[in-house]
Amino acid sequence: MKLDKIQQYLLKEIADITDTPEGAYNIRSNSQSIGRQSSANITITPKTEVSGIDIRIKEGTKNERVHIPVVMTESGLKEEVYNDFYIGENSDVEIVAGCGIDNCGSHDSEHDGIHRFFIGKNAKVKYVEKHFGSGEGTGKRILNPVTEVYMDENSSCEMEMVQIKGVDDTVRTTIAELKSGASLVVRERLMTHNKQQAFSVYTVSLNGKGSSADVVSRAVARDSSFQKFEAKIVGNAECKGHTECDSIIMDNGKILAVPALEANDVDAALVHEAAIGKIAGEQIEKLMTLGLTEAEAEEEIINGFLR
């Protein structure tokens, strides 16, 4: 697998890849797979009717990782990709995805990735998705991920959703349906600059007894950027659900938080929290007494907040 310097840079940012990954992987660049490998327990096959792949993880697979990052370096390229994950019962795996766009041209570049997860009974999944944009062109870097999660009994899924730099427009849609005993944890970290816009929409349905969800977003809106966080937890059984938006607003940035709870069972215990504010002056002053400039103090606080 041969990579140029820009591809290497993007893969490092979104998937911490510096060489050919071990185990199963599919690396996509400019609408083509440039490297694909299955393992004994994880099979990756291309779809035939639409662009995308099927990832099948055998029952009982433990301590394995699969990489499926996407990079785009051609200005004006737009693609829609469908990836389906079938995670066998009693497995324990990590899936590393993400998309990086480097746009040095005048035309918009866009990647719309639709990921569906079918998680078997007692299976455990960690999913890491990082989005990143770079390039000095006037064309936008647009990312619109759709994530659907269907969780069988007593399964668990931990999702790390990160977008820190360079994405001009994004609509991030996540839908999850949980059966009895299933557990979903989402940690979103998001920062916007300039005139960037970011919309995050979550709808989590707790359908089984003992199911639970914890959806937390930490976000920073700088310059004249705009963010909207909309999270809905639906309790259809005896369950526990929590959603939280914790945001910092700077300069002329704007943030709209729209938490929603829907309880359809008397034993559904649902909680939402939302907090939006600026960086406290005493925090900056304290760091400045240690020798940091005001700008350095702000960056240190933001980095710690989004860590």
Image (cartoon, helix red, strand yellow):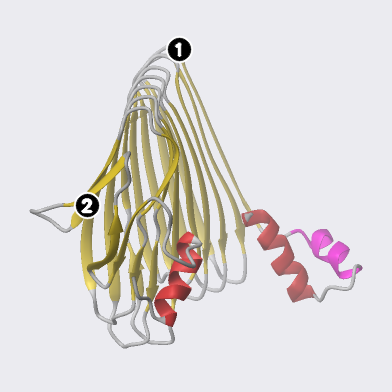
As shown in the figure, which amino acid type bears the numbered disc 1?
Asp
- Viewer-closest of 38 and 152: 38
The disc, 1 or 2, on the residue closer to the chain's N-terminal end is 2
Q: Residue at x 75, y 73 (%)?
A: 296
As shown in the figure, which amino acid type bears the numbered disc 2?
Ile
Measured from the top left, where is residue 53 in percent x and y?
22, 52
Measured from the top left, where is residue 30 in percent x and y?
26, 73
| 287 within the magenta span | yes
Q: How many numbered marks have been drawn onto this rendered protein structure? A: 2
Circle 1 or circle 2, nearest the eye: 2
Quadrant of image for the N terminus:
bottom left
Q: Which residue is mark 2?
A: 53
Q: Measured along the vertical axis of the image, is residue 109 above or below residue 83?
A: below
Measured from the top left, where is residue 63 in percent x and y?
47, 38
Quadrant hosting residue 111: bottom left
| 93 within the magenta span | no
Q: Residue at x 35, y 69 (%)?
A: 71
Res. 133 visible in picture: no
The span shown in magenta is 280-289
Element under disc 1? loop
- Viewer-closest of 182 and 32: 32
Quadrant hosting residue 273: top right
Q: Which residue is mark 1?
A: 267
Res. 96 visible in picture: yes
How many angstroms separate mark 1 from mark 2 (CA)? Answer: 40 Å
